[in-house]
Image (cartoon, rainbow, N blue to C red):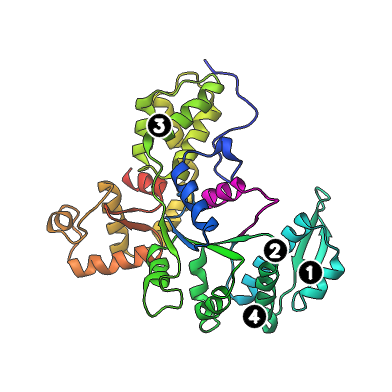
Amino acid sequence: MKAKQQDFNPFSVLAYHGGEYFCDREKETKQLKKALENGRNVTLISPRRMGKTGLIKHVFEEFDSKEVLCLYVDLDQTTCLADMARAFGEVVLEKIGMQSGRVWKEILAWFKSLRPVMTANPATGAPEISLDVQPSAAEASLRELFGWLEKSKLPCYVAFDEFQVIAEYPEPKMEALLRSHIQHLTNVNFIFAGSQKHLMTEMFMAAKRPFFQSTQMFPLYEIPEEPYFAFAQRHFERNKQTLPQETFHELYTTVYGHTWYIQCLLNRLYQYGTRQIDGQALQMAINDILTEYKETFRTYCKLLTSNQLSLIKAIAHEGKVKEISGKGFLQKHQLGAGSTVRSALRVLIDKELIAEDEDGYSVYDRFFGLWLRR
């Protein structure tokens, strides 16, 4: 028998919807807030889809917007300094309009290198700001943006998400350029967030790099099972559904506690509306998702060499592999020489198909791992 569903599915897989739909992270929220309030920049590192973006937005929501200026800038799709300045500038200009109500004439007088254009969203009619940043003026634009924040009457907190992409910009010495601006700011603090652990660690912990030991390192891990279960159970009960602890335990361990994949499965179970959620309902949710991604996963496989495909299949079947060159693992899955396996592993890590942590190696995309195992 199905329960009556509410209009809103509380298990979001796309965006942050506020504290009521944000699971736990109480300790991390307090730590990040204290770091910013006490003038420390932070390097936030986590695998993709672990919840770092949601955490940043949750922390920013905790601040009073009348006392602090918080800006979230996603750098994931940027490829050069001009792209960065454009993304940063649009967020800054939107925030200026919301906070101060200042007229465009004054804004244009300050941002001489930017070309802001105000348009109306065709669907909603809400005002939108876009920028035209010329490559030759990108550095000047960045300097003007930092300058505006520095002279702000409010403390400013800026989060650059997927910060590691700046290492791939074509401009030389990008890190040194940013560091030269940031180190002199007294009114602005930063969260540098990234999902590629080895790149982010190198950027902030290698003595030869400009950002060496300039931030508080902040690794983000899985949300513990107990508070996650309490969060899920509460929302299912509001929808007159029952989620037994053993079912949630199976769900949690199946995807190794990885936040986005847990949310996906909970979202489906909520959608189904079954009154008593059991292992059969969970398997139905997993089957539905794997069926939907089947062609995508087949494409992944076609893009891999035979050695790479054999290795990722072996890791998927094991779940976690501590010693990738261990004799037992190599022989069990007939993977050949250790040198060949290590070479394939490096490529799979670079492609973000294999994740590495203190427990060993696993398939980065938890659903892809389940599909390979089948």
For residue 73: magenta? no
The answer to whether any part of residue 75 appears in the image is: no
**Residue 361: mark in rendering:** none
Q: Earlier in the sequence, mark 4 or mark 1?
A: 1
Q: Locate residue 125, reporting x and y percent.
A: 84, 50
Indicate which label's residue lies in the foreground, 3 or 1. 1
Q: In this figure, which residue is indicated by the disc labeled 4?
A: 139
- The kind of residue tagged 2 is Val
Q: Locate residue 369, reporting x and y percent.
A: 36, 48
Q: Earlier in the sequence, mark 3 or mark 4?
A: 4
Label 1, residues with CA under 10 Å away: few <14, some 14-19, many ≥20: many
The residue shown at (71%, 75%) is 133
- The kind of residue tagged 3 is Gln
- The kind of residue tagged 1 is Pro
At mark 1, the secondary structure is strand
Q: In this figure, which residue is indicated by the disc labeled 2?
A: 92
The residue shown at (52%, 84%) is 172
**Residue 283: mark in rendering:** 3
CA distance for labels 3 and 1: 51 Å
Indicate which label's residue lies in the foreground, 2 or 1. 2
Q: Earlier in the sequence, mark 2 or mark 3?
A: 2
CA distance for labels 2 and 1: 11 Å
Please state the extent of the stretch shown in magenta in the rendering.
53-72
Q: Earlier in the sequence, mark 2 or mark 1?
A: 2
Indicate which label's residue lies in the foreground, 3 or 4. 4
